[in-house]
Amino acid sequence: MTSMKCSKKQFLYLLVLFGLFPEFVNAQNSAADTDSAFVRKSVDIRRTTLEPNIDGVLDDEIWQQATVITDLHQVNPVDHGTPTQESIFYVTYDDNYFYVAARLFDTEPDEIIARTMIQGQSVRFDDNVHVILDTFNNSRTAFRFVTTPNAIRDDAVFESPTSANFNWEGIWLVDSQIDELGWTTEIAIPFTTLNFDPNTTTWGFNLEREIARSNERLAWSSFNRAIDPSTGGQIVGMNGLQQGLGLDIVPSVTVANAEDHVNNTTDSRFDPSLDVFYKFTPNLTGVLTLNTDFSATEVDDRQVNLTRFSLFFPEKRDFFLQDSEIFSFGGDGNINGTPFYSRRIGLDARSGQPVDIDVGGKLAGRVGDLSVGALMVQQEDRIGVDDAPLFVGRMTQNILQESRIGAIFTQGDPNSLNDNSLAGVDFRYRNTRFASSHTLTGDIWYQQSDTDGLNGDDKAYSANLDLATENTGLSGVIGYNYIGAEYNPALGFANRRGIEQLSTEVQGRYFVSDNPLLRYYFGRIRYNHTRRIDNGEMQSEELSSRLFSLNSHQADRIYLDVQREREGLTADFRIRPGIVIPAGKYSFDSAEIGLESSSFRAFVPDISYKQGDFYNGKQKEVGVGLGWQPDPRFSANFSYRYTDVELPQGDFSTRLVRLNTTLAFNSTWAWINLLQYDNLSSLVGLNSRLNWNPQAGENFYFVVNYNFDTDGVFSGMNARDSEIVLKYSKNFRF
């Protein structure tokens, strides 16, 4: 208990420091920052009866009648600075579409960066424009549409002003052209793609432009370098809007052939499936899925785990990504203690293999300031698993100006015969205008699970406070988590139970003026202390610091980290076959230096080196990444991470190799490959996908998955299993 008392004292010191943040922040902000006040812009929009030809050429009569917006300002490198390039936007709408066109002047059109040619891939490092539509004008949630000089579509849904779901995909039209003046684009967003209140004539609205080669960011409306629903302007005059029938019918068919090369067996299947989306109201959508198949979903990136706790993998399946923001619980980045983790459904917990969903239904949307979500899924029958329907219900109520309160309920266990349920409540306070230049976020939640055969401590609760800024100044996070020993979120995620955790982080950022190389300095110190509830003993402790991070105008970075860790093992830890770390208390230090090159370039190196103690031994880790994109049609990314561990109980090393290649034949055809190898599983895996996307909402996939057993490094490879999949789907919207 003595060590815990010491840790609490340290934590209280940090708490006091955190309490002084506003004074430190105010002292460090520039006069421009402290005197600035957010004034919401507003612009009128007129309905049109004309219809443009979406070809990226601004020669249609409609643009002569549209609302014109030219008053963009810099966000980076100089907040509210003068743009280096002129931008002209045109905005209007008709019965079916919201239209945006833009003339993006560039004095060096040959230097425009437009490397991405595959729909759905990140356009972060290309020249691009953003359209943000806060259709409920609540300054909380919004749709974001992004395009490039290659007319690549990228979109997202803001779940909150500081959190967005980048996996959401909407159906919209766009085309772009590069010419001697810069580049142009035309965008048509169907009202059937959006949720909105037809009685609301004023929408939140914003425009953003990024000039990649100079890492320059422009916006129509922003505050303290933030561009999100809370900092947008508004567009007035959205009258008489309709969403049609609000019906989407998405049939798909999958043909697959799988081979087990070890047992010499073959399995062929023909699986039709159907997804139906219906808007009961303009902002409340029901989804029905029948015989859902996830064969065309991209595979997970492998991770090497040298801890004794399970890893968290992101969701990549469209059915669960749709309206996922409504089901989110607690604070941003909350992992341990997540009540609903959609990857528990449709995946076998033991094998990691897909499990077909016979039928699933979802209802999600908003009614005024109330957000509701309900999900029910019936999986295929499996031995040792309760085949009862799985249910998730979620509700949140907007309160105050930017805050919310909510509740969640889950029922069912997708991987056992045990009856399981969970109920939880959460509260989020948010103030994006705190201390003139900061965003203050506070999260509190409580959960209780109920599982057959578990009668102990089955509760979990948390409290976190986050003070953040994108400007010069200090930021910080402080939090407390309690996870009971018998807490069991069968439809959620918990990798540590029977613990309480104290955590805090302080970081500082300083923007440099008139430096030809550096844009800003960054530093951070982080402290985490986790102890067991049953005996109060330390389970793990981390004190780490990013001593410096030097960030260039082109987004290059060099950094130096130091770290001290403590681990308390109450039982022997089998880290590798034949290598067991005895129970006991351990303390070890390490340091890491890294260089990350900007992804704006054609050739991108990424190098890191870490060395230090590891339990009662030593550890070295080398990471090498190489990205290469000689032209927009082809790119390759190679990464290699090598870890060498020397322990008194034995030595071992881990290797993780990953190679991604993309070949875009044009903007509709793409061939994407992922090759992975790790020496822990001794498995080489290949995922190869040929994708045809002639328009938004229509897809054809030809997928080859091949796994090889290996002896040594790519020697003696033997085929373990393989699968060939053809899948076609098309969205019919009414």
Image: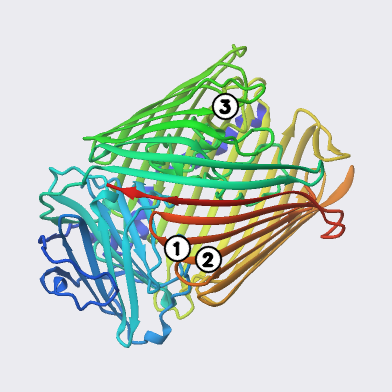
| Mark 1 element type | loop
Q: Tell me, yes or no, whether the two marked residues, 2 and 1, touch with CB atoms within 8 Å.
A: yes
Residue 130 image position (x, y, % from top left): 32, 63
Residue 589 image position (x, y, % from top left): 72, 50
Amino acid bearing label 1:
Gln
- Counting residues from the start of the chain, the first of labels 2 and 1 encountered is 1
Where is 203 relative to 331, above or below?
A: below
Amino acid bearing label 3:
Pro
- Counting residues from the start of the chain, the first of labels 3 and 2 encountered is 3
Q: Which residue is mark 1?
A: 119
Q: Tell me, yes or no, whether the two marked residues, 3 and 2, touch with CB atoms within 8 Å.
A: no
| Mark 2 element type | strand
Where is 219 relative to 134, above or below?
A: below
Where is 305 relative to 145, above or below?
A: above
Where is 161 relative to 575, above or below?
A: below
**Nearer to us in this view, 575 or 279:** 279
Q: Which residue is mark 2?
A: 670
Q: Tell me, yes or no, whether the two marked residues, 1 and 3, touch with CB atoms within 8 Å.
A: no
